[in-house]
Amino acid sequence: MGENKIYDTSAVIEIIKRGTRQRIAFISVLTAVEYPPALHYAEVVLYPTKKDYALAIAWQTELRIRGVPLPATDLIIAAQAVNNDMILVTMDKHFKILRDVVAKDLKLGTL
């Protein structure tokens, strides 16, 4: 598997909406739960680890202190990206908040 990108639900929905045959290498199982058609497009489904949950909790703790909590699902998907050294492909702007506030090592990509 050559592509080191994990696609957030927003990006998967956009790819499907455009009708392109773009390859989706990785998604989180959380994306599959949010949008089941994603399973037909993804090559690999990643399941969160304890390390992913721990990182998401640490981020959310700091985000809440700063008054900018984010959706738990998105934090876990971002943690999967960081812990697997992947680029998170997303259309959601709040991932930039996460990166700018607490997740300096989160690499973001867009379609």
Image (cartoon, rainbow, N blue to C red):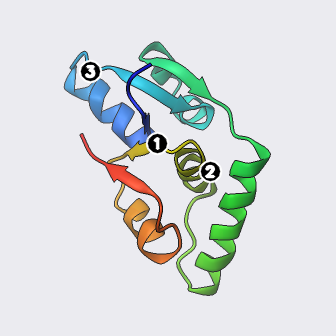
Label 3 neighbourhood size at 10 Å, few (<14), some (14-19), many (20+)? few
Residue hosting label 3: 22
Question: 87 or 69, which lies in front?
Answer: 87
The amino acid on which the numbered mark 1 sits, given as a three-letter code, is: Met
Q: Spatial distance from mark 2 to mark 3, Cα to Cα?
A: 24 Å
Residue hosting label 1: 86
Q: Spatial distance from mark 1 to mark 2, Cα to Cα?
A: 13 Å
Q: Earlier in the sequence, mark 1 or mark 3?
A: 3
Q: Position of residue 97 (x, y in %)?
A: 42, 70
The amino acid on which the numbered mark 3 sits, given as a three-letter code, is: Gln
Residue 33's tag is none
Image mark count: 3
Up-down relation of residue 87 to residue 105 (above or below): above
Q: Spatial distance from mark 1 to mark 3, Cα to Cα?
A: 18 Å
Residue hosting label 2: 76
In the image: residue 107, left or right of residue 67: left
The amino acid on which the numbered mark 2 sits, given as a three-letter code, is: Ile
Contact between labelled residues 3 and 2, with CB atoms less than 8 Å apart: no
